[in-house]
Amino acid sequence: MRIVECLAPVLGQWQGVHRQRLLPTDEFVASDATASVTVTAREFVSLAYTWSDGDAPQEGLLLLSGGSGQEGVSAVWVDSWHSSPAWMLFAGSVGEDSVVRLTGSYAAPEGPDWGWWQIFVAPVEGGGGRMTMLNLVPGEAPYEAVEAVYDHRV
């Protein structure tokens, strides 16, 4: 399934909640969130989103391509808190369940690269979408670092 078809139910302007934590032992911290999901240049989907770290507003963009007739899905991701000032590249696939699964990695200050192991983007039953991000510390199991649920159309 093409990325445009897969994410068609999520297209539009949304509000919701962004939750994140740094380490798996930390509690999640929630903030209000928005998302704008659009088709870009006919074959791409862009997911621009906002959230807050305390009083500091944050924003991000995930640009996705691929699906049917191509080798999987690819994406570029930027986020003012998570990836700034560099972007991250991801590769993945669209599952039979219409969930986009992406994997990538980033350089750690010391030692091997850490994995921003997976980003899942999926429509939510009843309307809206969910973006879940797992972090992978070398030698540890992946853990959920971010969950954003956009379930109120603006």
Image: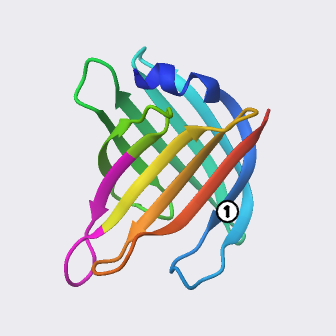
Specify the quadrant of the image occupied by residue 123.
top right
How far from the left and from the top, in percent, is residue 120? 48, 48
Q: How many marks?
A: 1
Q: Which residues are magenta?
A: 102-114
Query: What residue is at 68 percent from the left and 49 percent from the top?
Result: 149
Residue 16 in the magenta stretch? The answer is: no
In the image, residue 78 above or below residue 5: below
Query: What residue is at 50 percent from the left and 80 percent from the top?
Result: 23
Looking at the picture, tell me which residue is in the foreground, 132 or 35.
Answer: 132
In the image, residue 81 above or below residue 90: below
Q: Quadrant of the C terminus?
A: top right
Residue matched to label 1? 52
Is 119 situated left or right of 11 in this image? Answer: left
Specify the quadrant of the image occupied by residue 91.
top left
Secondary structure, mark 1, is strand
Looking at the picture, tell me which residue is in the foreground, 26 or 31.
Answer: 26
Residue 103 in the magenta stretch? The answer is: yes
How far from the left and from the top, in percent, is residue 128? 70, 36
- The amino acid on which the numbered mark 1 sits, given as a three-letter code, is Ser
How far from the left and from the top, in percent, is residue 42? 43, 14
In the image, residue 32 above or below residue 69: below
How far from the left and from the top, in percent, is residue 66? 33, 27
Query: What residue is at 28 percent from the left and 81 percent from the top?
Result: 139
Is 49 situated left or right of 86 in this image? Answer: right
Q: How is the image coloured?
A: rainbow
- Looking at this view, name the residue that lies furthest to the front: 96
Query: What residue is at 76 percent from the left and 33 percent from the top?
Result: 126
Question: Are there few (<14), some (14-19), or many (20+) residues within 10 Å of tag 1?
Answer: some
Q: Quadrant of the N terminus?
A: top left
